[in-house]
Image (spheres, grey):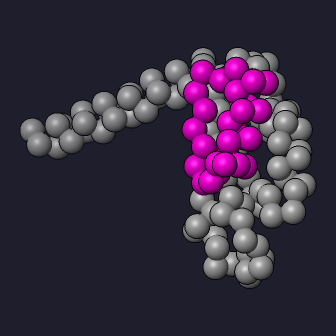
Amino acid sequence: MSTTPIEDSIRLKLTQSLNPTSLIIHNDSSLHAHHAAMRNNLSQETHFRLEITSEAFKSKMQPARHRMVYALLKEELQREGGIHALQLKTKTREEEERQRIGEEMEKGEKVGEVDVEKV
């Protein structure tokens, strides 16, 4: 029996339905265990951050993408002791590539600025 049944279910459902090129699941439940709402909750899987890259999101705005994920995880969200909080980052491969290039350019610009100051 798995010690992370909700995370396993998230991974299975999102992989099967969205065919992501990248899926990162962060279980942040331990960071929130002290909250009043979690006092009587025995689950160790209540708070998740998901980073999903999938072509299934192409031509969809963020709210529509999030609704897709919520629909897929409906059972886990409604289950007693299930997901209490879900943070989503959803993008396509093209958006991920643009972000990567932007970050590299930003780093390069900062390096250039530092080099100019040294001269």
Residue occupying image coordinates x 58% and y 27%: 22
Q: Is residue 87 above or below residue 93?
A: below
| Boundaries of the magenta span | 1-27
Please give the name of the residue rendered at 64% of the width and 70% of the height, measured from the top-left corner. 32
Residue extending furthest toward the left: 119
Task: Identify whether 85 is placed above or below 88.
Answer: below
Q: Is residue 95 visible?
A: no
- Among the 4 quarters of the image, the one containing residue 61: top right
From the top left corner, tell me how far across and down residue 75 is, in percent.
88, 47
> In which quadrant of the rendered view does residue 117 lie?
top left
- Taking the view exactly as shown, the residue that stands out farthest to the front is 1
Residue 109 in percent (x, y) is at 32, 33
Say if the magenta span includes residue 5. yes
Left or right for 110, reference 81: left
Report how many numbered discs are placed on residues in the image: 0
> In percent of the image, x 83 and y 42: which residue is there?
73
Residue 22 appears in the rendering: yes
Camera-nearest residue between 118 and 28: 28
